[in-house]
Structures are given as structure tokens and as C-alpha cells.
Image (tube, rainbow, N blue to C red):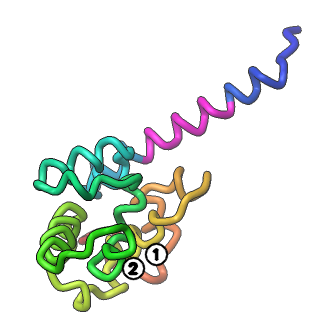
Amino acid sequence: MTNITDTSSCDLGNYVEAAARKYTEVVDIQENIPRCIYWNIEQVASWIRNLGFPQYVNFISGRKLIAVDASSLPSIGVRDFQDIKKIALEIRRLLKLPDKCQNMPMGNPRVAYLEIKRRTGVKTDAMHYKAFLHDNKHWFPHALYHD
């Protein structure tokens, strides 16, 4: 019988968590959930540079990008009104959200899913869109068939 040390069990746990996150990402992409929610800090920085705003590179991951809108941009250093409008619009496009945020109903399962994915944690990391729909079918009964 092999003796597994605490270190190797931690490594195994990290491997399992990473595999679960990757599986979730693959399932979400198949369901047309924006890939950007899985971007790391460097990928978000590259995206903001490509928009022409290298001065606004920040320590924001794709998961945190979900929570960024026009009202939160000043708190991370974006103060020019035209830049705020442009960046907020590009974030909504990237997340495949309507141009007008006030018209986004929480009854839309994709909007509700992105709201949940803003949070962090093992359970949220492992949740994918299909599982979210299944677990919340009482809220979105038709979404399983025509989203």
C-alpha cells in the first residue's frame, strides 16, 4: 500500500479543481457563454490594450470583468467620460449583453448565470451553464430547450 503524503494529496486536490474548472469552461463555451469570463489578468490586460487604453491596465480577471460597468469604472481609475462609455460598451459586447444594461431582465438565464459566475469559490468555479439551468429549472423552465 502506498503512503500518500499531505503534499501529494494537496497536489491531487489542486489537479481535480483545475480539471473541474477546465471542464466547466469547455461546457460553457459549447453553450455560447463568453470565453472571456475565464480570462486571466494578462488576457484582460491585453484586451484593454487592444482597445487602445493601455493606461487602464489593471489587475482584473475575466471573472471580475463581469462586475465592471460604467458606474464602477471610476473606482478603478477610468475617469474620462468618453473612455467610460467606450469601455463599458465593449465589456457588454464582450459578455454578449444588450447595449442598455437597464433593459436586462434577471429572467434571462444567461444574465443570471453571469451574475452567479461573478462570485468565486470551488462550487461556483465548477458550475457550468447546463448545471445552472438544471439546478434552477423552476426559475427558467423553458431555457433548457430554447435559450
**Location of residue 28 with respect to 22 vertically, above or below:** below
Labelled pair 2, 1 in contact (Cβ < 8 Å): yes
Tell me the CA gap for discs 2 and 1.
Answer: 5 Å
Q: Quadrant of the N terminus?
A: top right
Front residue of 48/101: it is 48
- Is residue 143 toward the left or the right of residue 121 in the image? left
Q: Which residues are magenta?
A: 13-24
Q: Circle 2 is placed at which residue position? A: 140
Element on which disc 1 rests: loop
Q: Is residue 61 magenta?
A: no
- The amino acid on which the numbered mark 2 sits, given as a three-letter code, is Phe
| Main secondary structure found in the magenta portion | helix
Q: Circle 1 is placed at which residue position? A: 137
Front residue of 139/68: it is 68
Q: Is residue 23 magenta?
A: yes
Which residue is at 50% across, 56% downward? 127
Q: Is residue 62 visible?
A: yes
